Each structure stands twice: as structure tokens, then as C-alpha cells.
Image: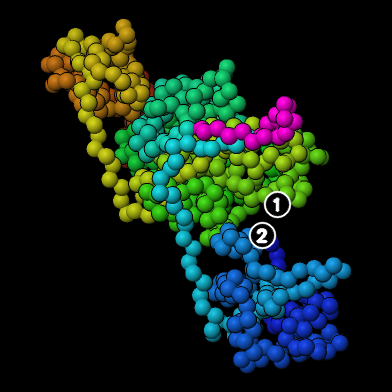
Amino acid sequence: MSRYNSLEFYETVEEALMDGYTAPVVKNICKLLTPKPPTRKLDMVTSICNSIKGDGLHSIWTRLDNLAQTAVSEIVHSCDNQFDTSRFMAKYGSVPYTGYLSEYGERKPSLINLLIINGTMPEDLKVRLKDFVPKPGSYTIEVEGDVPDTFIQRSYGYDYKSNERKEVSSEIPIVKAETQNLALQDVISVLRIIDSGKIGVSDKTKRPTEAGARTIASILEHGDFYIFDKDSDNSAIGHIKAFAWPLIVQSAKLAELSGSKLKLTKQGQKALNTPTHETIRTLWNKWLGTTIIDEFNRVDAIKGQKGKGKRGLSAVAERRRCIAYTLASCPVGKWISVETLFKSIRALDYNFIVTRNEWNLYICEPRYGSLGYDGSHTWEILQGRFTLAFLFEYAATMGIIDVAYIPPSMARDDYRGLWGADELYFLSRYDGLQYFRINPLGSWCLGLAESYKAAPIERRQVLKVLPNREITETKAPFPHSEAILLETIANKISDKVWKLDPDKILIAYEKGKSIEEIKEFLLSKNDQDLPDTVLSFFEDMIRRNNLFSDEGPARLIKVSDPVAALTFANDSRLKNLCISAEGGYIVVPSSKETAFRKKLRKMGYGISTP
């Protein structure tokens, strides 16, 4: 991945020593090679260069400890000459010893400072070291045997009796959510509820309104990750799945804004009849590149993301792809902690930045609460929170990963030392995510599996269709996606009784729903064959609907002379572009209007405007 830090490039070790170190540092390096170093810097550099000629370089290599040798190996066999401290730390857990500062402030270097100078290995050294330095070992992502049942949450309180600060611990149950089957059902429910015109979104941000999010939440199988209640502690968490779905379908152009409500596009109508797992893969791939939202915006506690702060944010699509590449490196079907993923993103060289200027971002107050201060913009605070939002709100919602989580309150303590965070129970609503697992659907969407075998559709007899076109629910629970479809073709006349409505069926037909599809839906849910009267009802509707077809918009042109209208409509130059109509009219399809006007002008005629 691309580097964001611009480090020096040195062609030779002599250039690096002269430009990269002061004379005292060069002298201390020289002392590691010869007991009596020269006094002038140039002479010391020459002495060092002579020491690494021939077998001298290999001798220095053998004097390095294992961790230092590993650091050299990582650079020698990489595509550039830079030492990525963050990546090395994530991969190996520590960095090589590079010396210390004496009590007088004098730097006492180690031998690795000769091979890696100011974070860069000189090109001539890299070429020579490649002859004998072995390749580093590959990075293996750690997996969990299983997810624990509980999370030990620790907090601190004050015991006034003993006048001491004491640790208080409690066990929080961990919730496991297997998401792939839920997502396969939810996406159909979401598309159908959008088709009913009930989901409102903002015309500027495209985000769902509170009412729209509540409607989405009500039709999700098993609901949202957290139960939303405006009077409960979870009100601060807000919606997750219900917030994400309207944005997800808009990003793939399956839905678009019409007035203040979402409506399905032609692609959205088509998706209702497409294998659901293929729709999910399309949504996932489109989401990776969308700019409809930056997931970091959902970390509400971090302010300053508008105006100047927004301009300083990095490209969100690049951030998502870095995480997706890391997910594609994870073993399928194994639980992995989010902390391991944080390390793996860096260790596998998929690191990214969230902002180019941390000073723009802040908590509570822009001056004292700025994240530009040392220790305030750690990886976990910025990149980590973006990663949690992407995983929990979008990857899990689309069924790419299974998740194990707890409530976000006090789930992470990495933000507690930040100025202004004292009153925050969590930095983001996603702080409760603890573990994730790539499931079969995710494996296919990430390109790890060649195909995905969807589970066979469960044909449950949950309805009884009566000869009078009434439909009764015979079993519970009735799936949300099926209830929404039933609502578009029938009227509810009692708690568990519906009646097919010809007007509703015609409206559904005009929106792209075929009569045959409606009939097959009822047949698959009915406890027996459909009654003859109902079959006749559908056959009659099919016959009637086949009489008419929408051929698209057209221009109606009035000709003052009816005989001339018929002559023009049958002219060899125009007859393929128009149709004659009674009363001296000519009908021109919109797709052919430009060609019709051009031909008519060549014949010496024009069309007056009304």
C-alpha cells in the first residue's frame, strides 16, 4: 500500500551517514567497529565504509540480535527501502533496540543504526544484503478457538469508607449474531418496504429519517443489533442496520429519492427477482467505492468533520479497500478478535490514514480537545473507530461477517485519557464489537470462494387461500418480507385474514411485479393447490393485462388537414418513425422524435410550438 510519510532515499551508505547523522552519532557507530575511530566526520565515514567491505557486512549482520536481523530482512525483501515501525510492531510485537540517550543527552546507537539510517536502508546495502539475508516469515492471523460467553468489564470506583480507589468488574454476556441468512431475508424486506413508498430520506445527505429508520427496523428479521427505545439507555446508540440499509441500496442504485421518499429503480425491481446472494455481492462491491457517506462521520463524539476538517479527510474508498483486503486474508469460518484485525491491517501492509491533519478533529472543544496532541490520535482512536463502523454497520448488515458483541458502554477504555471524554460512556456506537467471522456468503463476496450455494428455500405452508379470494395466516411467525409482499396485493380485513384486491394487484403489476410471480408466491405458501376460482381470477387478470403494453412516451402532433396527416404518416421517409391516429393526428415515439423532425425539415416542413 502507499506510504503517507515521506522519508529520505539514500543511494549509498556513505551518503546516508554524511547526510543522516551528526558527527557524534557517526563517532559512536564507528566505535562499535574500531576501538580508535578517527576524529573528522569524513574520515569516520570512510572507516565505517571500509569495515563493511567484503565479508565485513556479513560479519555485522551476524552480530545483530534476532529482532534486528528480522527488521533488516523485512526491508531487504520489501518493495522499498523504508522501515515501517507501525507495521513491524504490529507483526512482531516490538521493534529492534536502537540504542539510548546518555545522561548527557548523547545518543548511543546500536549496530542496526548502520544498516537502517533514519528509517531508511541505503540502496547499495540492500543490494548486497539480499545475497545472504533470508526472507522474513509470513504473517499469520491469530484466530480464536471460540468466542467466550461473557466479557469481563472493568471499571474503577471510590470506596469512601476505606478512602481507596477500587476496581469493579462485572460479566457482560456476549451476543453472537450469524448474519448471512438474516441479510438474505432483510435485503428483500427492505426493497419491498421501499417499493411501498414508506421510507423517507434526507434530500441532501440521503440518510434515512428517524421515522424511516424505525420503519426499516420494524421489518428486519431479529431486528437491529441493539433494541432501540427512546426511553432506554440504548437511545444514545441509535440505529445500525436500519440506518445502513437505505444507504446501501442507494449506493448500488437499487433505490433513489422521489420527492421525500425512496422508490425502487429498474435495477431495484430486477433485484427482487434476482438470486438474493447475487444482490448482496453487488451491494458489497458497490459499497466499497461509494461516497454516499464516510463511516467515520458516524463516530458522533469526534467533531470537526465538516468544512476544513472534511477537506482533510482521506479518500474513504481507499480506507474501505484496505480493510476488505485484510478481510480477504482472514481464514474463513474462524472467530477473530477486532484487536487482531487492527494489528493485521498494519502487519499485512494495508495500513491507511483517516485524516491528513489531526488538529482539525476534536472531542467536546476544538482547542483543548483537539486530537492533534501527542497520544490523542492513536491508531485505535482514528483508524480503529473507522474500522469498527465499517465492519459492524455495513459488513455485518450485508451478511459478510458474523459478529460477537456487547453493549458499547465502557466496552473500550482506549479513549478514557482524552480531554473531554470524561462524560462519554463510549466513543462510538460500535465500541461493543469484540469478534467477527467470515461466513460462506462473505467468503464468496470477498473472492475467496468460486461460488456460493444458497440454502434451499424453505417452503413453509403459512397461508390458506380460500375460494372467495380470502387468505388466512395459518402459522406464526409470518416472515416480514412475505408480509410486505402480501400487503401490496391484498387488504387486511382482520387480524390474520387478507383478501386479494384487484386494484392493488394491478398497481403491483404496473410497477413490474408479474401476475405469475404473485400466483407462484401464494402457491408456495398455501397448504394445498390454489382453488379453481382463484386460478381463474389470476388467468383473467393475465389475459386482461396482456391486452396493453407500455411502449414508452411519445409526441402527439396535430395536422390541420386529416388527409395530409394520413399521407405523411404513410410516406416512405416517415412511416418507420411515426403512427397515424384518427382526427388528423400523428404519434411520434420520443425515441424517434429527433429523426422525425430532421426528415420532416428535409421535406420542407416544420412543427409549430404550442
Residue 273 visible to an observer of this rendering: yes
Residue depicted at 62% across the width and 62% down the height:
94
Give the Cα separation between the discs numbered 2 and 1: 9 Å
Is disc 1 placed on a helix, strand or loop?
loop
Q: Which numbered circle lies on residue 27?
A: none
Residue position marked by numbered label 2 in the rendering? 4
Frontmost residue, 447 versus 417: 417
Q: Position of residue 562 (x, y in %)?
A: 36, 23
Relative to 79, is 169 above or below? above
Q: Which numbered circle lies on residue 356?
A: 1
Query: Disc 1 residue type?
Result: Arg
Q: Position of residue 465 (x, y in %)?
A: 20, 15
Relative to 319, is 49 above or below? below
Give the main secondary structure, helix, strand or loop, of the magenta stretch: strand
Classify mark 2: residues with Cα within 10 Å, few (<14), some (14-19) or many (20+). Answer: few
Ranked by sequence position, the earlier of labels 2 and 1 is 2
Quarter holding residue 458: top left
Residue 284 visible to an observer of this rendering: no
**Stretch of the chain drawn in magenta:** 156-172
Relative to 425, is 24 above or below? below
Q: Position of residue 468 (x, y in %)?
A: 19, 9
Q: How many marks?
A: 2
Frontmost residue, 466 versus 342: 342
Residue depicted at 32% across the width and 54% down the height:
450
Q: Check if mark 2's residue and mark 1's residue have beta carbons within 8 Å.
A: yes
